[in-house]
Image: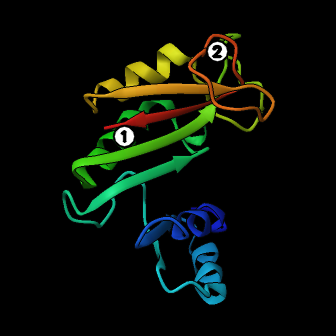
Amino acid sequence: CGDGYGCRILAERVGKVLGVDINQPLIAANQQKNETANISYDVADCFAMSLPDASVTGATAMELIEHLPVARVDQFVREVRRVIAPGGSFICSTPQNSHGDIPVIPWHVKEYSVAELRAILERHFSSVKILSSKSGGRLSEDCDSGQKMVALCR
């Protein structure tokens, strides 16, 4: 959840938000400054969360998978799928790289093409829709030349 920015946005629209991050000092800072009753924070490993099976109605991973080791991305998506209740949703955003295997942003482990992201997500979710945007523009179903991707999975 990083600094909790996305949690605060979600809290305005949903009943309860749980922000997780492996960074214990960051979670402690989020807990200390949290002024929103429907947000809680917890230290957790995205590859092995302590949440029970099917315990949440939805999950997000905004700008995360490009930082994960490629060999563990499937493990992460499988873990997210495990904690989402039947009928729940997963929203995932990541930069789009249509230019090859070398990440445009040097601190990213891998930036995925639309086809690569779709293949990963479809191994774990029966419905995957990918939208993209250019330079902060509106999301579009034209994914061939976007800079960012948002995947909607069920």
Instruction: Tell me if residue 138 comes above or below residue 28 in the rendering.
Output: above
Which one is earlier in the sequence, the residue at label 1 or at label 2? 1
Q: Circle 1: is it few (<14), some (14-19), or many (20+) Cα within 10 Å? A: many
Instruction: Tell me if residue 10 comes above or below residue 106 in the rendering.
Output: below
Q: Which amino acid does label 2 sit on?
A: Asp
Q: Position of residue 109 (x, y in %)?
A: 63, 33
Instruction: Tell me if residue 99 comes above or below residue 37 in the rendering.
Output: above
Q: What residue type is labelled 1?
A: Val
Say which quarter of the image contains residue 23: bottom right
Q: Which residue is drawn at 54% across and 18% down?
A: 114
Q: Residue at x 77, y 25 (%)?
A: 104
Question: What quarter of the picture does the C terminus occupy?
Answer: top left
The residue identified by callout 1 is 77
Say which quarter of the image contains residue 137: top right
Q: Is residue 114 left or right of residue 44?
A: right
Q: What element carries label 2?
A: loop
User: CA separation, marks 1 and 2?
Assistant: 21 Å
How many numbered marks appear?
A: 2
The residue identified by callout 2 is 101
Say which quarter of the image contains residue 110: top right
Q: Where is residue 105 in the image (x, y as percent from the top left)?
A: 77, 32
Q: Position of residue 37 (x, y in %)?
A: 50, 86
Q: Circle 2: is it few (<14), some (14-19), or many (20+) Cα within 10 Å? A: few
Question: What quarter of the picture does the N terminus occupy?
Answer: bottom right
> Which is more toward the observer, 103 or 63?
63
> Which is more toward the observer, 65 or 86?
86
Q: Is mark 1 on a helix, strand or loop?
A: helix
Mark closer to the observer (1, 2): 1
